[in-house]
Image (cartoon, rainbow, N blue to C red):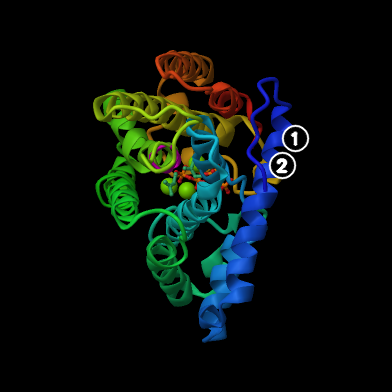
Amino acid sequence: MSIETKSNIDIENYLDKQKSIIDTNLKSLFEKNKNFSSPDELWNAVKYSLLDSGKRIRGIFCLASFESSTRNDDFLEDCLTIACSIEIVHAMSLIHDDLPSMDNDDLRRGKPSCHKAFGEAIAILAGDAMLSLAFQLVTEHTKNISSSQKLNLIDVLAKAFTLGLVPGQVLDLMNSETGGDLKLTEKIYKLKTAELIRASILCGAIIGLDPDNQFGNKSFELNEKEKILEHFSNFGLKVGIAFQIIDDILDITSDTKTLGKTSGKDKEQKKGTYPMIIGVEQSKKIAENLISEAKSELKKIPLKTQILSELSEHVINRIN
Ligand code: IPE
Ligand code: IPE
Ligand code: MG
Ligand code: MG
Ligand code: MG
């Protein structure tokens, strides 16, 4: 495994490569650990929803911010484990998001959603298992990062879920039928989507900026490091909000086959999304502005952040 450091990156190629690294790692987790195989009903549902599918953008962001923060390969494998944890949390959030009591979506990642394939009870339990599995990976499957770093990562990941994604999903549910308030919608985007994307970027930077893991010969003073993390954090938040705006635009402008999930779902459920409230064009502009603000944050970071900049650009140009 090597760290990608080129500055003129072919982004599609980079995404494919990083996705395949994450996919392989996730698969081997189940091949190597027989604990994650019985009962079949549970783990088949987990593997069905997790393996070989999804763009892996959160995991890729995590690896990219690590790559921007260090040249020390010793921590790369642990960063990959954390990238997998994040993808596991994300995949379980999709299983629950699709449930009949939530978005009631029958299609996910180009196939029947978990509850359609395995029933509602198993889908809920698969999600439960995945959420705890994600944290188990941090505690049990990392090799070189220190215990205090593990705590730090668990803290970031847990808070993104408890204080971000879950309250965001609750507000999102309440926003159905009554949608229309742009400020509230922005808050929902921030919570349900941007917090986990921000956490992905922060986790990579936290590992990369570990004092034991110096950037070449350069180690940062504590307050310098905190400032850098704050810029990563601001970058992640803006990218995350833009990500959800684009998801909501694609729900209107794209088709089910391209998306691998049911298009037109937000309208059907009368969700208050940006494009529903202010139209597709204006929403696209807001997303573009957010990405340019996000890139300004990167400029304040005294590290090589070109790949993060290209990834943020991809977020608004993506087709699914
Ligand atoms: C879908 O996320 C849910 C949102 C937060 C918009 P992705 O678009 O990253 O879904 P996958 O992982 O590629 O399936
Ligand atoms: C994001 O919103 C869902 C999560 C944060 C889990 P959506 O409900 O729009 O996501 P999709 O469109 O179903 O993937
Ligand atoms: Mg939803
Ligand atoms: Mg949904
Ligand atoms: Mg959506």
What residue is rendered at 66% in x and 21% in y?
7
Residue 164 in the image: above or below residue 126: above
Q: Is residue 180 visible?
A: no
Q: Neighbour class for label 1 at 10 Å: few (<14), some, many (≥20)?
A: few
Q: Is 26 placed left or right of 148 in the picture?
A: right
Q: Work out whether residue 113 or residue 213 is closer to the camera in this orientation and state it.
A: 213
Residue 40 locus on image (x, y percent): 57, 84
Check disc 1 and report the residue beneath it. 13
Residue 139 in the image: above or below residue 243: below
Residue 62 locus on image (x, y percent): 49, 41
Q: Work out whether residue 264 or residue 298 is closer to the camera in this orientation and state it.
A: 298
Q: Is residue 205 magenta?
A: yes
Mark 2 residue element:
helix
Residue 70 in the image: above or below residue 300: below
**Which residue extends farthest front?**
217
Cα distance between the residues tagged 1 and 2: 5 Å
Mark 1 residue element:
helix
Residue 194 locus on image (x, y percent): 39, 36
Residue 135 locus on image (x, y percent): 38, 62
Circle on res. 16: 2
Report if the beta carbon of the residue with label 1 is closer than 8 angstroms to ligand 1.
no
Residue 264 in the image: above or below residue 119: above
User: Is there CB contact under 8 Å for labels 1 and 2?
Assistant: yes
Q: Is residue 213 magenta?
A: no
Q: Which residues are magenta?
A: 204-208
